[in-house]
Image (spheres, rainbow, N blue to C red):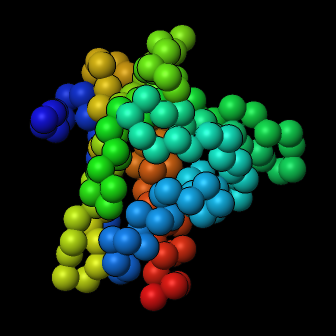
Amino acid sequence: MQTRTAELDLEVSRIIRAPRDRVWHAWEDPERLAKWWIPHPIACRVVSLDMQPGGAFVTEMSENGEPFVPHLSACFLDVIPRERIIYTNALTGGWRPAEHGFVTAIITLSDHPDGTRYRAQALHKSRADREKHEELGFHEGWGTVVAQLAELVEIEA
């Protein structure tokens, strides 16, 4: 298994005060995923969420009521229910090579005394890609969506 490399990888983590099943459900249900996947007030539409190896993961976004435009076109590499999700935009659904791959993401969920430990790692092929992702606002963007996820599932507690 890949270990974190500071030169190539970025990470956000958070303790979410909700059971792991509830956090997982917010991932596997397209309607719920659309509520937290992109920082508000941008709207998200889930086009495809085939959570199995080789399955497509496609989302679109809309700002200020504008038409939806592409956000993410990726392929799930590994899915272990309630534990781990790995996807990459280097491939599209059905293992097809993507034109411009940039990142592989590893999402892990584990039990914590206060709920669920949520960890999201973004793996990059080069230091330049990592730095570009950081400059584009990785910590703010990915941190915001994890906070939105937490808000969604903690309300249900």
| Residue nearest the viewer, comparing 64 with 118 | 118
Residue 7: give x, y in percent of width and height: 20, 28
Q: Is residue 130 visible?
A: no
Residue 146: give x, y in percent of width and height: 44, 61
Q: Residue at x 15, y 33 (%)?
A: 2
Q: Is residue 114 visible?
A: yes
- In the shown orientation, is residue 90 left or right of residue 49? left
| Residue nearest the viewer, comparing 112 with 30 | 30
- In the shown orientation, is residue 27 left or right of residue 62? left
Q: Residue at x 49, y 15 (%)?
A: 96
Q: Hey, which residue is sitting farthest bottom in the picture? A: 157
Q: Quadrant of residue 6?
A: top left
For the C terminus, the image quarter is: bottom left
- In the shown orientation, is residue 9 left or right of residue 58? left
Q: Quadrant of residue 19?
A: bottom left
Q: Residue at x 54, y 11 (%)?
A: 99
- State whether residue 135 is above or below residue 84: above
Residue 67: give x, y in percent of width and height: 86, 39
Residue 32: give x, y in percent of width and height: 60, 63
Q: Quadrant of residue 152?
A: bottom right
- State whether residue 91 is above or below residue 78: above
Q: Residue at x 54, y 37 (%)?
A: 57
- In the shown orientation, is residue 134 left or right of residue 144? left
For the N terminus, the image quarter is: top left
Count of labels shown?
0
| Residue nearest the viewer, comparing 64 with 49 | 49
